[in-house]
Image (tube, helix red, strand yellow):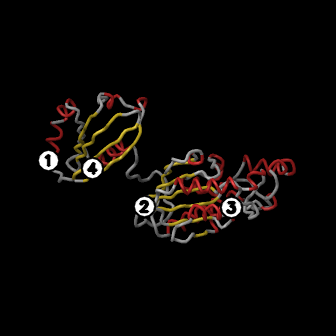
Amino acid sequence: MADIVAPCSCSSAASSSASAQFARSWWSFSLNLGGSCIASSKRRRNSGNVGFVIRASASSHDASTSTAASSSNSAAKESGRLSLNGSSSYATRALEWVTGTALDFRGATDPLIPTPLAAGKRFFLVRHGLSSWNEEGRIQGSSDKSVLTEIGVSQAQRCKHALSKIKFDKCYASPISRAKSSAEIMWSGREEPLIFLESLGEANLLFLEGMKNQDARQEFPELFKAWREDPRNFNVNGVYPVVNLWGRAKKAWAEMLAGSGQTVLVVTHKSILRALICTALGLEPERFRAIDINNSGISSFTVNKLGEPMLDSLNLTAHLHADDVFY
């Protein structure tokens, strides 16, 4: 017998007609899943916050169990007990309904690696804190001349605090100073060394780097327009920065997934983060600007054993505005 305690939140607008009948303060239900799993739960209705305790036990699947479950459906519904009869796949669906989270998933995205993993992994992707060239409105790219500001340092410290309840096994970061400094702040106090990957570096924007955005727009209007509106075909002297990012993002995923550890922190830059997220979701370079990431914004992915990623959160920034936010 195993207990799972799972907090979640729900709104009355999201309640289905099937669950509305259980609108009393406490209710319980059991799931008979073709004899393979029985789960019982208690649910307390507060101001939108719900807690669940799930008890599950395995039993052998036989005809008598299925018949008994089928014949008791009517009585179960009347007494506030919900009984489902079917294949074992219903167990996952039922627990997903209870916890509000996917306990398993397959086929939603393409694998990021050719061979299965020994175990799934979780990745937390963080953009560096505010930099000097961010403040000045300059194009940064792969330049190492932009450094963290005081605000940027504070943002990195807030990230460290917000992630302090997570036991990380590894931290990968871009070697470019603004990301490197952010990672050093977030990873301080841990024994495991930081790992710097060239594949996590920012897009190489060549002679545009260091220019103010407004100056680049005026001096190179067609080039600047392509950078903003046609990322796949944007090229600087024959170099395609966004297309190249896609290749490096795939390489970075492969490198990080090949490493040890199941919970991983990644600290890098906006453009490569866009590429990491888009490649994980199967989006092409045309969708480069479909996603934005704030300074010190946090996103997360779960990657299953097959190497298939699922986006858990995108550009979380609440931790930058409150001290009691933890992820």
Mark in the foreground, 4 or 3 = 3
What label sits on residue 63 in the rendered view? 1
Instruction: Tell me how far mark 2 sits from mark 4, CA to CA.
Output: 22 Å
Mark in the foreground, 2 or 1 = 2
Q: Secondary structure at mark 1?
A: helix
Mark in the foreground, 2 or 4 = 2
What label sits on residue 302 in the rendered view? none
Q: Is 296 placed left or right of 74 in the picture?
A: right
| Label 2, residues with CA under 10 Å away: few <14, some 14-19, many ≥20 | some
Expressed as whole percent of the image width and height from the top left, the position of residue 70 reads: 18, 38
Please state which of residues 316 and 288 is positioned toward the viewer in this rendering.
Answer: 316
Please state which of residues 286 and 170 is positioned toward the viewer in this rendering.
Answer: 170
What amino acid is labelled 2 in the image?
Gly
Q: Secondary structure at mark 4?
A: loop
What amino acid is labelled 1 in the image?
Ala
What label sits on residue 120 in the rendered view? 2
| Nearest to N terminus: mark 1 or mark 3 | 1
What amino acid is labelled 3 in the image?
Arg
The residue at which mark 4 appears reads as 88
What amino acid is labelled 4 in the image?
Ser
Q: Secondary structure at mark 3?
A: helix
Instruction: Tell me how far mark 3 sits from mark 2, CA to CA.
Output: 30 Å
| Nearest to N terminus: mark 2 or mark 4 | 4
The residue at which mark 3 appears reads as 178
Residue lying at the far right in this picture: please name it. Answer: 219
